[in-house]
Image (spheres, coloured by chain):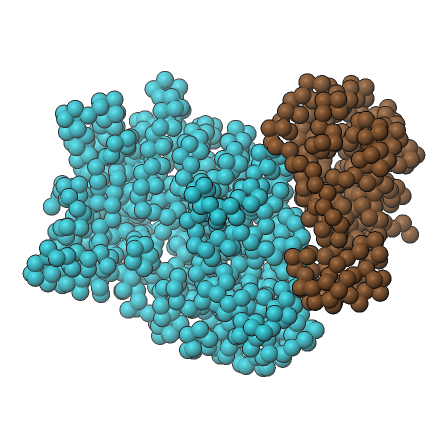
């Protein structure tokens, strides 16, 4: 049976597509963006997360059969296999498991009670992580929701085989397509992946008539320069499918989750509001479509 | 004494001559309630009026004297409790008596006055008529201080007077109606006396307007700004001669009447101001900006007059002039946004035909963080009122609401909430063999020891019997208040503007009002539901401990048993769309609603309905409630309105709304649903807000109270209160400046989830 690994299902999501949505966060991502604000969705396995502020350092978790836990509550997330023993043993309730294997029907059952809120505009957003890293599961889910008449948005980094996107097209109403770094070398450096496939898939989807919102994380020191904005602007003229650009200014909330995973912080400067306004104004002058944030 | 204005007193309470004269009249007309009341008003009303102040565009500032007759009087500087009908503020009288300047003779005179009113004030008369059960179970009225399951309140508040009739007829027209009615040869003596008193009341009000006019003329002569004084003066002259002719006249008369009545519910303001507004506007007699200035003066008077509530309703079905009403709703709301205060409480009846302009303005007001307007699901509210109050569709269409959102029928019903129950305390005494552990004395029924409840159903049944027992007493108390008021007074000001009183020639609560109803405030509904859900699971299903052991742990406030508390906290909670908790909550609520509703026939009310609201009582009552089995620590606030316990909604907004929609609100006279939403949502996602409200209403939720703020704003306000004087929050049934709330209520607000 088709199953997928989901890190969370979040109702009343209002930043991931139109209207009131429920977001299904897939777990696992082929990219390794240093600013990622959902680091727990990057790992492709179930694992523990530890709230260090609650941890009493009692060492109860050190019995871990995978030796993923230290005697003071430390966690090696890559060793953890999510057996849940430490979750049960922790007296401070400082540990939780992230990730759940679910069938499309189970996801559907979780989402359906929220359906009245979707009304004309809202729906479900497949997000992550990278949904297309579990392409079969993503497709099964999109079909499920589509059959129910629920609006489906796919939030994707674009790094998956073209055939997988082709399969998704009939069941996806809106693509929230990431455009992170325009310069290919810089893209490789900051995300660990080649942007060629991403660019091609974007072109392909546009040619196929997909509705696309380009989602552009703005990371100071990484892509907050005019050249990048010019490239985005150019894309909007080249690709008819792009109907809007969303600027997503960097925020540091991912660091809290990195700490819970036993990872070191990754800090970038948080942009000031007037800086974001400036980007928006500049890009608006270069873009064929509205620029939002 | 007539014609003697309070403003002639340098200090209001330096002289109690008005009080002595009033008391003389009161004694003189013993046994003739209508005549007595009009004579008392004739003495007292001129003394409560105070002069116009700089910037006032309307006359009718008022104060409350230590003695008087009012639907409700309270003094926050003493006990803050309501006093109904003929009230006496002993603390204020005593203060005058103890002044150093007071002579021995003066002291003795005041002491005698106090002795008289101590027994004669209507609150005291109600208490002296208490049944034995009431004496046993309602030993204190201090609900905000003492421990107990039920408490009585004493008031005739929140009636929605027929200001539309007042505006159409004016004082002279109302008098003509009364005189016409008096021609009936079949009227009995009492009826004639009542109508005579009403006619004299219209004269009295006219005379006071005349005195205001004289005072304004005096101001003109002494060189006051003509542009300011003259329009006011001309308006008063018109109002003395007949019905309001202009928008200003209408506003002036409504304010004046309500100020002297002492009631602050303005009902469907868009209806009664709409026609004159449009007429003046189209004739070029007034601009929208001038209307806003007049309304601002109205709102300022409301704010400056001690009062709670102050509701202004706009929108909804059943308006005789929807187009005009929608047009005046715009300046009504715009002035509110400019005023940006906690009063008045704007309320929007959201019907399908709501104008987009009014809707958009209302959303802007909410986005601004004003907590207003309160939103009502209009079609569903009409259906609910029709069903619960057993009235016609046309009558239900005229519903209004008061206080925290309780329904009342516009100018044809009384629904004052005069009893409150702490449901969590009712469970506490049930678990303690009919004892209040805090007071250490018997309270309620002794239905057995914890070990006697060998099944969950047995415990549930005991709890239901306990609630029934207290609810019966409360209903009897509600009726007793009405009966005592009926014996003592006629409530003339209210009677004149309530349907049927003139026609029946009977005072308001003596057979005059069409529907004499009551409401019953319940607190801690969710706390009890969550507690019983946890008890069912931990004690009866998982058998982790006996009920006796659990009660002992609660008595120790979980000391040394944090693990047990954690286990209880982990049990399912109302507000997450989970059947285990929600189903029990629904059945408990329905039981309380129906038990209450059944009392109406038994005690002789047209309806007696639960209101699940909040006025901060969840904090006060929580202070005297021990630890509860939902994991709540002793003394902590109880749940608020129809909401989950603060912080226990763990599954998101849709799940919370599903749970709340599960409560059978259409068996109540109103429930409060509080939402904390982000400013980002309101500013940047108007479509989402629209979908959210429409969906909540489609699910059957009857009303929404919305606080809008930024994440972290409350935390910052606690650290830097001086920077956040304008952070308004909807606590439950009332709005407040966050920084002025007591720490318990602040904690309740903080713990609630912010959505969006």
The answer to which of B596 and B427 lies nearer the viewer is B427
Q: Quadrant of the C terminus of chain B?
A: top right
Name the residue: 74% across, 48% down.
A264
- Res B253 quadrant in image: top left
In the rendered view, would you say B162 is above or below B403?
A: above
| Residue B737 drawn at (x, y percent) | 43, 45
Q: Is residue B587 left or right of residue B122?
A: right
- Color of chain B here? cyan
Q: Which quarter of the picture shows residue B304?
A: top left
Observer-nearest residue: B39 or B661? B661
Residue B73: horizontal and vertical position, in percent? Answer: 30, 53
Residue B37 position, x and y percent, is: 21, 52
Residue in front for this viewpoint, B186 or B434: B434
Q: Is residue B554 above or below residue B498?
A: below
Q: Is residue B213 above or below residue B414?
A: above
Mark count: 0
Residue drawn at x 83%, y 53% as measured from the top left: A78
**Residue drawn at x 74%, y 29% as measured from the top left:** A223
One can see residue B436 in this view = yes
Which residue is more in the foreground, B639 or A215?
A215
Q: Colour of chain A?
A: brown
Query: Where does residue B447 sit, x and y in percent of width and height?
Result: 52, 79
In the picture provided, is B539 more to the left or to the right than B172? right
Q: Does residue A167 show up?
A: no
Report the side of B209 relative to B561 (left or right).
left
Q: What residue is at 46 percent from the left and 42 percent from the top?
A: B724
């Amino acid at each position: 049976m088709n199953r997928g690994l989901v890190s969370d299902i979040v109702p009343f999501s209002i930043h991931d597509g139109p209207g009131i949505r429920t977001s299904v966060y897939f777990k696992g991502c082929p990219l390794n963006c240093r600013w990622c604000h959902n680091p727990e969705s990057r790992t492709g396995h179930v694992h523990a997360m530890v709230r260090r502020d609650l941890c009493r350092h009692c060492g109860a978790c050190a019995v871990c059969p995978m030796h993923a836990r230290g005697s003071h509550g430390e966690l090696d997330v890559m060793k953890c296999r999510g057996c849940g023993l430490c979750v049960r043993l922790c007296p401070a309730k400082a540990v939780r498991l992230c990730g759940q294997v679910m069938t499309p029907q189970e996801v559907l059952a979780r989402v359906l009670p929220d359906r009245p809120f979707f009304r004309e505009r809202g729906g479900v957003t497949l997000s992550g992580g990278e949904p297309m890293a579990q392409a079969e599961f993503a497709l099964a889910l999109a079909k499920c929701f589509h059959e129910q008449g629920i609006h489906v948005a796919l939030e994707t980094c674009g790094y998956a085989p073209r055939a997988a996107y082709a399969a998704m097209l009939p069941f996806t109403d809106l693509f929230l397509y990431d455009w992170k770094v325009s310069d290919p070398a810089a893209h490789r450096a900051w995300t660990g992946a080649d942007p060629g496939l991403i660019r091609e898939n974007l072109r392909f989807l546009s040619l196929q008539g997909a509705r696309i919102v380009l989602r552009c994380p703005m990371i100071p020191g990484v892509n907050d320069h005019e050249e990048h904005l010019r490239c985005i602007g150019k894309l909007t003229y080249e690709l008819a499918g792009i109907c809007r650009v969303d600027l997503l200014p960097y925020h540091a909330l991912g660091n809290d989750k990195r700490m819970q995973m036993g990872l070191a912080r990754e800090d970038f400067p948080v942009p000031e509001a007037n800086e974001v306004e400036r980007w928006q104004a500049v890009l608006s002058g270069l873009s064929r479509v509205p620029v939002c944030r | 004494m007539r014609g003697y204005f309070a403003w002639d007193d340098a200090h209001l309470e330096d002289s109690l001559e008005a009080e002595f004269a009033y008391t003389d009249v009161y004694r003189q007309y013993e046994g003739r309630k209508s005549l007595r009341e009009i004579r008392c008003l004739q003495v007292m009303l001129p003394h409560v009026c105070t002069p116009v102040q700089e910037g006032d565009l309307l006359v009718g500032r008022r104060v409350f004297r230590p003695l008087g007759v009012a639907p409700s009087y309270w003094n926050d500087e003493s006990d803050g409790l309501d006093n109904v009908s003929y009230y006496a503020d002993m603390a204020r009288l005593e203060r005058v008596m103890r002044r150093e300047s007071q002579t021995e003779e003066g002291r003795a005179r005041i002491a005698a006055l106090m002795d008289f009113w101590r027994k004669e004030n209507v609150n005291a008369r109600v208490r002296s008529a208490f049944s034995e059960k009431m004496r046993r179970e309602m030993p204190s009225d201090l609900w905000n201080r003492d421990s107990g399951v039920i408490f009585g309140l004493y008031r005739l508040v929140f009636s929605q007077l027929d200001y539309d009739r007042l505006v159409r007829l004016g004082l002279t027209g109302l008098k003509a109606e009364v005189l016409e009615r008096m021609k009936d040869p079949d009227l009995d003596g009492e009826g004639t006396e009542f109508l005579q008193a009403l006619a004299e009341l219209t004269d009295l009000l006219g005379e006071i307007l005349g005195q205001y006019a004289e005072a304004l003329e005096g101001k003109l002569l002494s060189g006051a700004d003509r542009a300011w004084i003259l329009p006011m003066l001309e308006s008063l002259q018109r109002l003395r001669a007949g019905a309001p002719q202009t928008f200003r006249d209408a506003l002036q008369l409504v304010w004046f009447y309500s100020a002297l009545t002492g009631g602050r519910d303005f009902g469907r303001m868009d209806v009664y101001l709409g026609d004159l507004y449009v007429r003046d506007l189209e004739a070029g007699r007034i601009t929208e900006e001038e209307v806003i200035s007049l309304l601002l003066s109205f709102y300022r008077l409301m704010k400056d007059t001690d009062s709670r509530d102050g509701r202004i309703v706009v929108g909804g079905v059943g308006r005789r002039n929807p187009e005009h009403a929608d047009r005046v709703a715009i300046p009504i709301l715009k002035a509110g946004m400019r005023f940006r205060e906690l009063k008045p409480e704007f309320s929007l009846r959201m019907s399908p035909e709501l104008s987009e302009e009014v809707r958009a303005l209302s959303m802007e007001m909410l986005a601004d963080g004003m907590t207003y307007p309160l939103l009502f699901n209009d079609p569903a509210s009409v259906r609910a009122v029709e069903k619960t109050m057993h009235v016609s569709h046309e009558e239900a269409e005229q519903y209004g609401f008061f206080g925290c959102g309780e329904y009342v029928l516009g100018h044809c019903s009384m629904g004052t909430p005069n009893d409150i129950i702490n449901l969590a305390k009712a469970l506490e005494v049930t678990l303690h063999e009919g004892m209040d552990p805090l007071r250490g004395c018997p309270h309620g029924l002794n239905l057995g020891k914890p070990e006697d409840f060998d099944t969950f159903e047995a415990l549930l049944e005991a709890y239901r019997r306990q609630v029934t027992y207290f609810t019966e007493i409360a209903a009897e108390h509600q009726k007793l208040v009405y009966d005592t008021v009926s014996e003592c007074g006629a409530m003339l000001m209210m009677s004149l503007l309530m349907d049927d009183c003139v026609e029946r020639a009977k005072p308001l609560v003596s057979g005059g009002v069409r529907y004499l109803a009551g409401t019953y405030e319940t607190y801690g509904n969710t706390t009890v539901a969550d507690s019983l859900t946890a008890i069912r699971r931990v004690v009866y299903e998982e058998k982790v401990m006996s009920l006796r052991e659990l009660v002992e742990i609660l008595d120790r406030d979980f000391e040394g048993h944090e693990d047990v508390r954690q286990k209880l906290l982990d049990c399912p909670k109302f507000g997450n769309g989970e059947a285990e908790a929600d189903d029990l909550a629904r059945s408990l609520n329905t039981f309380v609603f129906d038990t209450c509703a059944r009392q109406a026939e038994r005690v002789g009310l047209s309806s007696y309905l639960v209101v699940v609201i909040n006025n901060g009582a969840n904090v006060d009552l929580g202070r005297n409630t021990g630890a509860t089995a939902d994991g709540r620590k002793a003394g902590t606030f109880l749940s608020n309105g129809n909401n989950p316990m603060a912080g226990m909604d763990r599954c998101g907004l849709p799940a919370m709304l599903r749970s709340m929609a599960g409560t059978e609100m259409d068996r109540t006279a109103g429930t409060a649903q509080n939402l904390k939403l982000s400013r980002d949502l309101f500013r940047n996602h108007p479509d989402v807000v629209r979908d959210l409200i429409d969906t909540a209403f489609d699910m059957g939720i009857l009303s929404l109270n919305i606080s809008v703020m930024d994440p972290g704003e409350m935390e910052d306000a606690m650290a830097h209160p001086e920077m956040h004087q304008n952070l308004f929050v909807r606590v439950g049934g009332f709005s407040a400046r966050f920084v002025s709330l007591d720490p318990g209520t602040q904690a309740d607000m903080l713990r609630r989830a912010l959505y969006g």
